[in-house]
Image (cartoon, rainbow, N blue to C red):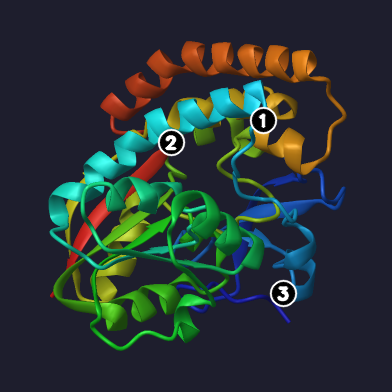
Amino acid sequence: MTPECPRCGQGEFVVLFAGSDRLYRTTTREFQVVECASCSLLRLEPRPTPEELRQFYPENYWWSPDPSVPGRLEGLYRRMVLGDHVGFVAPGVERGPVLDVGCGGGSFLAALARRGVRVVGLDSSTRAAGVAWRYNRVPVVCASLENAPFPPESFEAVTLFHVLEHLPEPDQYVGAARRLLAPGGRLYVQVPNAASWQFLLLGARWSGIDVPRHLVHFRAADLVGLLEAFRFQVLRQKLFSLRDNPAGLATSICPGLEPMSRRARGVPESGGTRLLKNLIYASLVAAALPLAALEAAAGAGSTILVEAVKQ
């Protein structure tokens, strides 16, 4: 049976290219990135089963604090670039509560909490929830958004940073977010941009594809159309992220140097070796910054960050 497109339900598609797991190396199996022949949505084929997907996510897939010198430097860098996300969300939020879906160790929510905003995290990992509470004093519920134990209309804002591309049916999460938002509540969504220069130039080598974990690949029109289908009005779009765009290009060029993937893969490194690799990677990120800024200025940035209001 031909697999169906999650947006239009049609089965015909055009194969764009094939790729495997370049970043975490959880599998050598190849998958195809295809374009729906009916609605042009990009997706992964064959779609992994839920059991297979769990194998493609390392246990420490998210970033966590590390007391070593390289770890502290990584933490300083992450807090600096995270300010870009906080600065985008904070103007649309008064006192909260804000629900961050896929919150990991809770760094983003901790930054909002320091501004006096009430926050709650949602993540599938109990380990991430423990880190979020121990290090950032952020309460986290372990559940999926569809089954989250919160009353309807109980949040001022919901954030979905790099979540929808991991889902076989992204519309279900958008619908669940709508149910949890109060009237006039804000939804913040970020996804890789499949219409970016990085995607067009690098194809299967672009880190935003992240085979086999990213199941759906969005262009701006795809994301806006999905939100509007659930009666959200898009207020703002941003195509540049200081945290994600330059680092994404650096990771595309040299995935073996990406710090979080090295830690997740258990690469044996002395403190000095780790620090040297991190410095080389940071140099790549710095070199990628003007290119990432240029493509965003041209309307083809490698991520899409959207603020939408519930109508």
Query: Residue 84's spot in the image, x, y percent?
Result: 31, 35
Q: How many angstroms separate mark 2 from mark 1 (CA)?
A: 20 Å
Q: In which quarter of the view is residue 256 placed?
A: top right
Measured along the vertical axis of the image, is residue 251 above or below residue 37?
above
Mark in front: 1 vs 3 = 1
Q: Nearer the viewer, residue 205 or 21?
A: 21
Q: Residues within 10 Å of mark 2 (few under 14, many from 20)?
A: many
- Observer able to see residue 115: yes
Mark in front: 2 vs 1 = 1
Query: Residue 130's spot in the image, x, y percent?
Result: 59, 61
Q: How many angstroms separate mark 1 from mark 3 (CA)?
A: 27 Å
Measured along the vertical axis of the image, is residue 49 above or below residue 204?
below
Query: Dot 2: what SS?
Result: loop
The amino acid type, in three-letter code, at marker 1 is Pro
Mark 1 or 3, nearer chain start: 3
Q: In this figure, which residue is indicated by the disc labeled 1?
A: 259
The amino acid type, in three-letter code, at marker 3 is Pro
Query: Dot 1: what SS?
Result: helix
Q: In this figure, which residue is indicated by the disc labeled 3?
A: 50
Q: How many angstroms separate mark 3 from mark 2 (CA)?
A: 27 Å
Measured along the vertical axis of the image, is residue 276 above or below residue 224?
above
Name the residue located 47 percent from the left edge and 25 percent from the top edge. Answer: 246
Name the residue located 85 percent from the left edge and 53 percent from the top edge. Answer: 29
Determine which of the numbered discs, if any, sits on residue 302 in the image: 2
Query: Relative to residue 129, is residue 190 drawn left or right?
Result: left
Query: Dot 3: what SS?
Result: helix
